[in-house]
């Protein structure tokens, strides 16, 4: 059986970087794409091919997929990992930033998926793995834009799963909990810039501390753990539709299913009390 071809977006750090390594170790020919190409250079020593890829630039996305399909004839597994978290009150975050959040987290994912589907459909097989979050099922104060995008990824993935099933293409969702990457620190800094000095400043300080706590903390999930789940999803003969992964992911999602909204609101906010100074 020929080696399978995987394309990973957002591979310059964290989950994407570790997923490229894990997929390569599992025997895939791996193409890793991101805007910060220099940060992916260490991947080349492992035999991973790196690509310049900006998921907000259509020409960049077309060029990346074309490069892989020209070199290998196909993409067997697409890992849509590129994304970031935009936090701040809905009142204060400019609409331009909200659009950018959707451009990266939803529309970039959708366009990358559009580009690989034709060859997958012709082959009668393929796998699309969308990195969502437990934030696609739960919510946080000052996280309206971010959570809206992850809810969208969940719904889009469910629809895709059904429409692509007749063509032999699997669609899988990965739902990490707080992960030890730079994501939380960057999201917290953006939150403070947007809402750290206005009418939402008290909530902003609490939420920024909570977001930053996922970076470099012993209780956070290492990105390699999420990468292992992505690799399982890529290699399973019949993958699950969803892979909650990380500390507390299953329990948080279970609480969301069984608790009424206001009860879950209380549990969620009480969990942030330790960050109040």
Image (cartoon, rainbow, N blue to C red):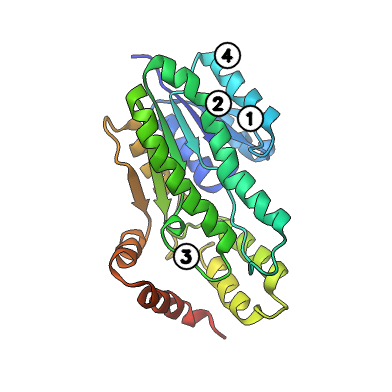
Q: Classify mark 4: helix, strand or loop.
A: helix
Q: Which residue is mark 3?
A: 139
* Of pointers 1 and 2, the one earlier in the residue sequence: 1
- Residue contact between numbered discs 3 and 2, judged by CB atoms under 8 Å: no
- Residue contact between numbered discs 1 and 2, judged by CB atoms under 8 Å: yes
Q: Which residue is mark 2?
A: 115
Q: Position of residue 101 (x, y in %)?
A: 63, 51
User: Which residue is situated farthest in the bottom direction here?
Assistant: 277
Residue depth check, mark 4 versus mark 1: number of the one nearer the observer: 1
Q: Which residue is mark 1?
A: 61
Return the residue nearer the eye: 110 or 225: 110
Residue depth check, mark 3 versus mark 4: number of the one nearer the observer: 3
Residue depth check, mark 1 versus mark 2: number of the one nearer the observer: 2
Q: Position of residue 224 (x, y in %)?
A: 43, 47
CA–CA distance in space, label 3 to label 1: 30 Å
CA–CA distance in space, label 3 to label 4: 41 Å
* Image quarter of the N terminus: top left
CA–CA distance in space, label 4 to label 1: 14 Å
Q: Residue at x 55, y 39 (%)?
A: 109
Q: Position of residue 9 (x, y in %)?
A: 56, 37
CA–CA distance in space, label 3 to label 2: 31 Å
Q: For mark 2, does the 10 Å Cα neighbourhood hold few (<14), some (14 to 19), or many (20 or more) residues? A: some
Give the number of the disc on residue 70.
4
* Of pointers 2 and 4, the one earlier in the residue sequence: 4
Q: Residue at x 47, y 39 (%)?
A: 19
Judge whether residue 260 can be spotted in this image: yes
């Amino acid at each position: 059986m020929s080696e399978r071809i995987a394309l990973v977006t957002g591979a310059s750090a964290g989950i994407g970087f570790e997923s490229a390594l894990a997929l390569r170790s599992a025997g895939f020919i791996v193409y890793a794409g991101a805007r910060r190409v220099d940060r992916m250079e260490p991947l080349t020593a492992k035999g991973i091919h790196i690509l310049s890829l900006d998921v907000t630039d259509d020409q960049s996305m077309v060029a990346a997929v074309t490069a892989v399909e020209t070199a290998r004839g196909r993409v067997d597994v697409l890992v849509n990992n590129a994304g970031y978290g935009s936090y701040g009150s809905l009142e204060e975050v400019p609409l331009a930033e909200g659009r950018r959040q959707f451009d990266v987290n939803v529309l970039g994912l959708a366009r990358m998926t559009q580009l690989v589907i034709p060859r997958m459909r012709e082959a009668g097989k393929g796998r699309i793995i969308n990195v969502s979050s437990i934030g696609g099922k739960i919510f946080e104060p000052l996280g309206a834009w971010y959570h809206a995008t992850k809810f969208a990824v969940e719904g889009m993935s469910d629809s895709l799963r059904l429409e692509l099933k007749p063509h032999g293409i699997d669609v899988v969702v990965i739902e990490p909990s707080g992960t030890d990457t730079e994501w939380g620190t960057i999201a917290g800094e953006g939150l403070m810039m947007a809402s750290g000095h206005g009418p939402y400043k008290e909530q902003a300080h609490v939420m920024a501390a909570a977001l930053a706590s996922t970076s470099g903390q012993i209780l956070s999930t290492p990105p390699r753990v999420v990468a292992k789940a992505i690799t399982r999803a890529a290699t399973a003969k019949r993958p699950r539709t969803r892979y909650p992964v990380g500390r507390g992911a299953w329990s948080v999602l279970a609480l969301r299913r069984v608790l009424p909204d206001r009860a879950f609101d209380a549990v969620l906010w009480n969990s942030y009390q330790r960050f109040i100074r």
